[in-house]
Amino acid sequence: AEAIVAGARGTGVKIVGCTWPGMPQVVLAKDTIKTPAELKGHTVAISSPGSLPDLVFKGMLDANNIPVSEVKFATQGADLDRYKSLVAGITDAAVVSNEFVAIMPKNLHVMMSARSTVPNFLRLCVATSSKVLASKRDDLVKFIAAEMDAYKYAEGHKDAVVKLTHEMTHAKPDDKRAAFIYDQAIKEKQIDPALPLPEDRIEWMENLFVKAKVIPKAVPVSQIVDPSVRADAAKIAGK
């Protein structure tokens, strides 16, 4: 999302492929708040203004015809910070990764899923600059090929992925979150080792950001993407 915003603002940012075209983000809410319409007047934990949680939540509000001005926003940092603020009762809802669904208490529920509410929203794409494309394109192609290989390997090796995740995050062996989000990512096809460039979805996001007053106007998608890099990377991936 941030790369699309930067590219639309004429910074020279170029998107070369999307590793997570699917969205694992959800809105968790207190069980006393049943529907999106009931969020009016309540406080929702996001990250910083202009961040992915902020932008995807604004897309969810738009999908439910709820003006942004009718909801209060609380900047709460990372996913864990937002989750803790909701559990502690500091906020009434929070935009978080769906891994927290595996451990949330019974007084919380999933109010909205980005996957179903804003299916065109892209989670993660690889972006670079026009300068890098001009001076280090060969290295970039090799990097994208390595990303393709890495995601392909991860797609078929759950145990290794969960083990490494526990090591990197210092999670306890019985922590369910890594396995949960892995299963969801595979089941819902949230990741794609081919690193696609869905230009129709990028265009949709640009229009959403214009409506949300994040960017002044949309630009032709061709100005913010470079499909040639992933095309060349695909020729050497797996070799």
Image (cartoon, rainbow, N blue to C red):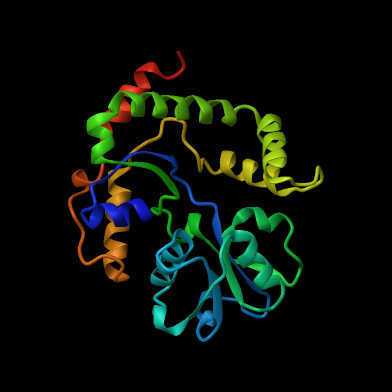
129 displayed left or right of 78: left
Q: Is residue 53 above or below residue 191?
A: below
Which quadrant of the figure has residue 235?
top left
Counting from the top left corner in percent of width and height, residue 44 is at 55, 75
In percent of width and height, residue 189 lies at 51, 40
132 sits to left or right of 112: left
Where is residue 178 drawn, in percent x and y? 68, 44
Specify whether 44 is left or right of 192.
right
Relative to the observer, which residue lies in front, 135 or 217?
A: 135
The N terminus lies in which quarter of the figure?
Answer: bottom left
Examine the rendering and report whether any part of residue 1 can be seen.
no
Residue at left 63%, top 65%? 81
Q: Nearer the viewer, residue 142 or 223?
A: 142
**x 73%, y 45%: residue:** 170
User: Tag count in the figure?
Assistant: 0
Q: Quadrant of the C terminus?
A: top left
User: From this viewpoint, is residue 161 visible?
Assistant: yes
Q: Residue at x 72, y 62 (%)?
A: 104
